[in-house]
Amino acid sequence: MMSPLLETEIDDGVVQEVHRVARAARLASRRLALLTRGEKDAALLAMADALVEQAEQVERANAEDLQRGADAGMPQNLLDRLRFDAGRVADSAEGLRTVATLPDPVGEIVRGSRLANGLAIRQVRVPMGVVGMIYEARPNVSVDAAGLALKSGNAVILRGGSAASSTNAALVDVLRGAMSARGLPPAAVSLLVGGGRDSGRALMTARGLVDLVIPRGGADLINTVVREASVPVIETGIGNCHVYVDASADVDMAVRIVVNAKTHRTSVCNAAESLLVHQDIADAVLPRIMKEFTAAGVTVHGDEAMAGFAQAQDTPYVPITDADDDTEFLSLDISARVVRDLDTALAHVQEHTSAHSEAIVTQDRAAADRWVAEIDAAAVLVNASTRFTDGGEFGFGAEIGISTQKLHARGPMALAELTSTKWVVEGQGQTR
Amino acid sequence: MMSPLLETEIDDGVVQEVHRVARAARLASRRLALLTRGEKDAALLAMADALVEQAEQVERANAEDLQRGADAGMPQNLLDRLRFDAGRVADSAEGLRTVATLPDPVGEIVRGSRLANGLAIRQVRVPMGVVGMIYEARPNVSVDAAGLALKSGNAVILRGGSAASSTNAALVDVLRGAMSARGLPPAAVSLLVGGGRDSGRALMTARGLVDLVIPRGGADLINTVVREASVPVIETGIGNCHVYVDASADVDMAVRIVVNAKTHRTSVCNAAESLLVHQDIADAVLPRIMKEFTAAGVTVHGDEAMAGFAQAQDTPYVPITDADDDTEFLSLDISARVVRDLDTALAHVQEHTSAHSEAIVTQDRAAADRWVAEIDAAAVLVNASTRFTDGGEFGFGAEIGISTQKLHARGPMALAELTSTKWVVEGQGQTR
């Protein structure tokens, strides 16, 4: 029941520094909450322009990070993620321009009515206040978070992976410069530098100063934040996503969806990690799936029934372990089982779901209805790849993460999810 | 940064027992999620009937609790709160009948669209799953929570104050009986008995088994839950509510609202605890407010400017302390200051607000607009008593608490706030 980390105190100097940053952010957030959409959009466009104009400065800082990473033996896939060249700077700038085109969530009236006693009540979207982002060495997250926070009227405190510290410092420098030039408070976008792990811990325990912390990264990072934070948290991004091929599935469609969900991009949370196939359709569908898996280099962690299908197509195969059923591989691996019926599939997913995205392939309306009703996840999909659970695909124009919790936000999060509400009650002297 | 309570392990036997209860609740919650509105409403009416029929049994159990409380020297106001006689049983039953009349939140489509690629997406309200309630010795909360949880398709685990243990056991017995008779799983409503403080701690750390914990009670209880819980929490019910009388206020209205907000009911979170009066209206409004305070027995914790007004009307007066500005008295006490102008009032409230309910009395449109825009609270009120921040007053038909946090729910919480959402994505074989 205890977190081992809580046994060590957070360095007091780091706490003081993080609280100083948070207080400045809080003050800035009061200004941000009152900005008009026009002011915010103009600032976003200025930030985008500044990024493109100063791309070289960002690239130079990124080169330092890359060099340090390479020297420290950082694996290639992490170096790729860390890279932030002029092309990626331009992509991020384009992202800010897109955010400028989106409607302002602040001020939206969610519901309202006039009460019998004449009081007019309305529930209005307001900014959260100060949002903390804790994430890995991915510089694009710094720009995305700054843009989405500004548009939703929030101050943001960035706590990015230390491997990206030079890049993040350069980015925040550019963004703050553009904001200051337009009269916005620079403390609207702050970066925690130094303090190591303690700065993140101080951020997630700064109750009253920080309104929300969003961790983005692997399971370890997210679990640490959930365990240690006293500030409200939105969990994101762990996906042990299943695709279940029902007896009645269209075979072509099933092959297409399974292969796309597993292989389109393996490092993302909405990739399929687990395949369930109804026994009655196994002979029709599995030879074709295995053939495609072989071509794509997928390793099947399969039950006994899967072994034969894999071997027949030369698909890399290992016997499934209990742990595999709960593993988010984020690689060209998939756990796979042949199941007796829909009930078995439902029970398996209910037991092993990470409540991210769960897909069924079926032509049977009743089976689809049961899947939609009985699987409790951020997204339940019928005859579509799990890869569609995404803010961009859903038409949100942007995404700050995919919530896998039930409180406040579930699924892709964009601008509305970065707001709270307040009730405005207007009367003519009413009392009780 | 450390919670002293976390230094002690939770008793393992208690953890096992709470997890056993939570797993049963979880299983029950799957059934509850699929119930139709008709099934739920019929069960609610049966529960109400059973309560009335078995009121004597409940009263007898309550008499035991009251006797135990009296023997232990429980103060009169707590004994009053603990009392659950036939009249209160009937009120609670009536509450269940009201919940039966409310629309079912489950299945409501919050938003949806058809994407360019043909995918149909919709965001649908679903139950949270298992909700834990941690509260003091107030038996009516047990019935309210059971009713609201059932209607919103959730299983609920009750952890009420031990002083009400016999009453709660009797109530849950009656409610479960009525549910079983209608074929509903009795584990839908569970009561944690025994285990002392550790049972609450085990409940709030049962991640993966419990989806949400709502603490209802005083500041100590709520702060403990917020600090210790790893399950998502909704904070409720601390209200250091202000009434600010602006220079332009209608004097009659100001007197009426201030007196109502302070004295209508003092033990509730939406009572006024702090009065600010613009210096230009002090002479007109304060003699009348003080006169009413004297009649009602209110003690003013006032600044120097207040002292003269209080003395002139024989109003009990003590000099204000810094702590008073942040105190939720829950009694016939109020902190009171004369302020120079609206800006001073705004700054004071921004510093001392508990973000519950903050009221301005003004005839000045610009002042009202600034109040509404610049005060960040669950409810901002113009020319109305703070006492209106209430689920019943807002027309929700019921209330499970008033959230003072920004995440998920803010202000009065009823059925919709006990739900999450899921995205349903329906396609014809789409892949990325």
Image (cartoon, coloured by chain):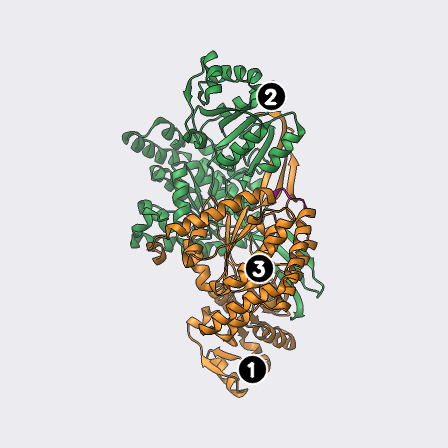
Chain colours: A orange, B green
Q: Mark 2 points at which residue?
A: B253
Same subunit under labels 1 and 2? no
The amino acid type of the residue labelled 1 equals Met
- Determine whether label 2 and label 3 are within 8 Å by CB: no
Report the chain holding disc 3. A
Q: Do labels 3 and 1 share a chain?
A: yes
Crowd rating for badge 2 (residues with CA inside 10 Å; few <14, some 14–19, many 20+)? many
Relative to residue A345, is residue A16 depicted above or below? above
Task: Measure how far apart labels 1 and 2 are at the Cα level.
Answer: 77 Å
The residue that disc 3 covers is A171
What is the C-alpha distance between the residues marked 2 and 3? Answer: 53 Å
**Given this view, does label 3 or label 1 mark the residue nearer the observer?**
3
Q: Which chain carries label 2?
A: B
Up the image or down, B72 lies above or below B19; here it is above
Say which amino acid is labelled 2.
Met
- Residue B378 in sight here: yes
Tell me the kind of residue under disc 3. Leu
The residues colored magenta run A33-37
Dots 3 and 1: beta carbons under 8 Å?
no
Residue A367 at x, y percent in the picture: 59, 66
The residue carrying mark 1 is A290
| Upstream in sequence: badge 3 or badge 1 | 3
For the point 33% across and 50% down, which residue is it?
B6
Q: Which chain carries label 1?
A: A
- Viewer-closest of B370 and B279: B279
* Label 1 element class: helix
